[in-house]
Image: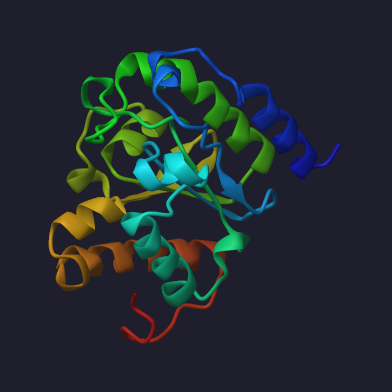
Amino acid sequence: MNRRERLALLEERYRSCEHCKLSRTRTQVVFGEGNPEAELMFIGEGPGKQEDLTGRPFVGRSGELLTKIIEKGMGVERAAVYIANIVKCRPTVDLQFQKDRPPDAEEVAACSPVLLRQIEIIAPRVIMTLGGPATKFLLDTTTGITALRGKWAEFKSIPVMPTYHPSYVLRNGGDHSPLKKDVWHDIKLVMQKLGWPVPGKDERSP
């Protein structure tokens, strides 16, 4: 059985998951998408409104920025990488399905085994964590993302590069945010690690 088939079986198994309270409010499970044999895997914290409606990860405003980073900055198609989240259902404040929030410990404990299985199947050469929750989970740390970003870490022998979540960049100036330079720095480190061609000074900066 190839990786695509193994991922499809995993997705089918959890399509009707009721392991935590998020199952009571979701529209649909947002499993993840991309190349089952991807060299690079992006991991965020959880789906937002547009993701819940479409069943696809990172398709809202933050998803548009991530896609721009991948396609314009890294020079590869979004479909060439794999994108997933720690939890597969949208976490909202008081389960009112209005304001997004990071997943809580119970939700992470219930859903993270799916992510761990995705990582095992895909076996990426590099993982890039997007934001604090994903970074803290994968690296088993309480240190904040500001201190961790831009520094190589490791998860089960896979190099991990933490960086800011696209939504954090958008909340702090968007296209004019000074955080974009930090993210671009981290992206270039990932490309170097993978042996992908890195453009000259700001030539392709997203």
User: What number of labels is visible?
Assistant: 0
Residue 74: where, in percent of width, then height?
47, 72
Camera sees residue 150: no
Say which residue appears at 41% left-offset and 32% top-offset.
138
User: Foreground residue, 119 or 20?
Assistant: 20
From the viewer's perspective, is 94 left or right of 78? left
Residue 154: where, in percent of width, then height?
45, 40
Q: Quadrant of residue 64?
A: bottom left
Quadrant of the drawing holding the N terminus: top right
Q: Quadrant of residue 188?
A: bottom left
Say which residue appears at 51% left-offset and 32% top-offset.
28
Residue 159: where, in percent of width, then height?
48, 47
Quadrant of the drawing holding the C terminus: bottom left
Camera sees residue 141: yes
Q: Is residue 12 above or below residue 42?
A: above
User: Foreground residue, 166 or 152?
Assistant: 166
* Residue ranking furthest to the right: 1
Say which residue appears at 50% left-offset and 12% top-offset.
19
From the viewer's perspective, is 107 left or right of 8? left
Residue 108: where, in percent of width, then height?
39, 21
Q: Quadrant of residue 178?
A: bottom left
Q: Is residue 72 above or below residue 52?
A: below
Way the structure is coloured: rainbow
